[in-house]
Image (cartoon, grey):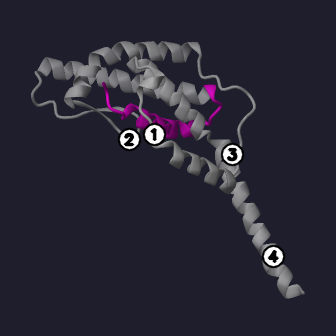
Amino acid sequence: MKIFRRPVWMTLMIFSLMIFACVTINIYFPAEQVETVAGEIVDEIRGQQPGDEKPLHNEKSNLFNRTFFAFLCPVAVAAEPLTVSNPGIRKLKQQMKTRYTQMRPYYQKGVLRESNSGYVSLGNTGGLGLKVQRNLKNLVAAENNDRRKLYGEIAKAMKIDSSQVNRIGEIFAKEWQKPVR
């Protein structure tokens, strides 16, 4: 009898640890909520409508993924509504929206690129005049400064620890990297 109890007990303990590990990740960093906020903010800054994007996956694979992961790791969702709008965020979004109209042609030419960290970088500026290059550098510096502030404000609004701001930037990077139309 003792031989049989030990493996069952160990199996239950390992299974319990896996469940708690999945819940812990979602409690401390709400990645799905940040992704939703990132999509809305980037679309607003770029002046795109929410329905402009085409889905990347078909509905069958999405249904399978949701069903499979629903049984694998339970998701902990906060009961309070998600609010990410405050005067600071609204001001930053407006500044970035205005700046985007100046930057858009350079995105389309490939002169400006989105990094994986959520910030803008300069590409090949060889065909541009010195004055244009200087102005672009100033635009990039201002944009990156506003993005850094935006990520910090989002962390405050969503009650995410300030040490996770870089992670917020990485999630935003996926939205920024979508093709500019």
On screen, 70 above or below 138?
A: below
Q: Nearer the viewer, mark 4 or mark 2?
A: 4
- Between the residue at mark 3 and the residue at mark 2, the CA separation in whole angstroms equals 26 Å
Q: Could you tell me residue 65's position as x and y percent?
A: 57, 50
State which tag comes first along the sequence, 4 or 2. 4
Q: Nearer the viewer, mark 3 or mark 2?
A: 3
SS of the residue under disc 1? helix
Is 65 placed left or right of 180 in the picture? right
Observer-side mark, 3 or 1, equals 3
Asked if the residues shown at circle 2 and circle 1 are in contact, with their CB atoms under 8 angstroms apart, the answer is: yes
Residue at horizontal 62 percent and vertical 54 percent from the top: 68
Mark closest to the chain's N terminus, 3 or 1 = 3
Q: CA distance from mark 4 to mark 2?
A: 45 Å
Q: Quadrant of the C terminus?
A: top left
**Residue at label 1?**
170
Amino acid residing under circle 3: Val
Residue at x 34%, y 38% (from the top left corner): 115
Closer-to-camera residue (73/91): 73
Q: Earlier in the sequence, mark 2 or mark 1?
A: 2
Local packing at callout 4 (Cα closer than 10 Å; few below 14, some 14-19, many 20+) is few
Q: Which residues are magenta?
A: 157-181
Helix, strand or loop for disc 2: loop
**In front of the other: label 4 or label 1?**
4
Residue 117 sits inside the magenta stretch: no
Kindly identify which numbered label has been placed on residue 8. 4
Query: Pointer 2: what residue?
Result: 116
